[in-house]
Image (spheres, grey):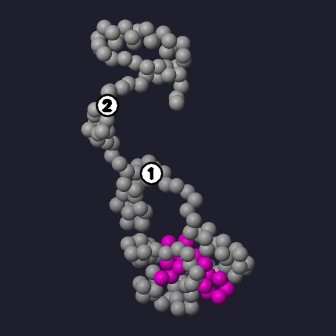
Amino acid sequence: MKLKDIKPNPNNPRVLRDDKFQKLKQSITEFPKMLSLRPMVIDENNVVLGGNMRLRALQELGFTDVEEAWVKRSSDLTEEEKKRFIIADNVAFGEWDWDTLANDWEVVDLEAWGLEIPQFDNEPSYDELIGEEKNKPATMKITFESPEQLQKAEIDIQEILDRKYKGAYFSVSAGEI
């Protein structure tokens, strides 16, 4: 099919800018089979319903013809269905399982394939953790299985505090506030 016969959708609500668009072009260059597996979708007038950025990337890469498998015709959609398809084709419903990605894939590959990897904060250091809290009294939270267990422990805790940690005190609450 002649690429010049495929028309971009003038009302396409989705764009790829700068580095993401460059990654799409790189992906097409390195993995053109993907276009057969996820073709552009055009209507009866050859207007793109899904794949406007792929069309633009192919044009910028100098393609003049594309394989028929890279384009799927969808002539039987109503105008309402066309509008819905344009949005639904670009909506991401799922979420990434970052643990699985970290364990089963290489970060360098994921980034090369266009996946944006968020910067997860590393565990904060002790100093970062307490920061402004340095001047506040140190506290400890102890959780008991039942109110009865808490009542029994109160006496023991008070004895230990009185004997070993002068000036320390504890407070009790039953349940979260």
Q: Position of residue 9 (x, y in %)?
A: 57, 83
> In the figure, residue 25 lies in which quadrant?
bottom left
For mark 1, does the 10 Å Cα neighbourhood hold few (<14), some (14 to 19), or many (20 or more) residues?
few
* Left or right for 56, reference 164: right
Q: Position of residue 68 (x, y in %)?
A: 57, 83
For mark 2, does the 10 Å Cα neighbourhood hold few (<14), some (14 to 19), or many (20 or more) residues?
few
Q: Secondary structure at mark 2?
A: loop
Residue at point 56% right, 78% down?
A: 12
Task: Residue under label 2, please give it.
Answer: 136
Labels 1 & 2 near each other (Cβ < 8 A): no
Is 95 in front, or is 70? Answer: 95
**Tag count in the figure?**
2
Task: Residue under label 1, please give it.
Answer: 98
Q: Amino acid at mark 1?
A: Trp
Above or below, 60 against 24 in this view is below
Magenta segment boundaries in residue numbering: 33-56
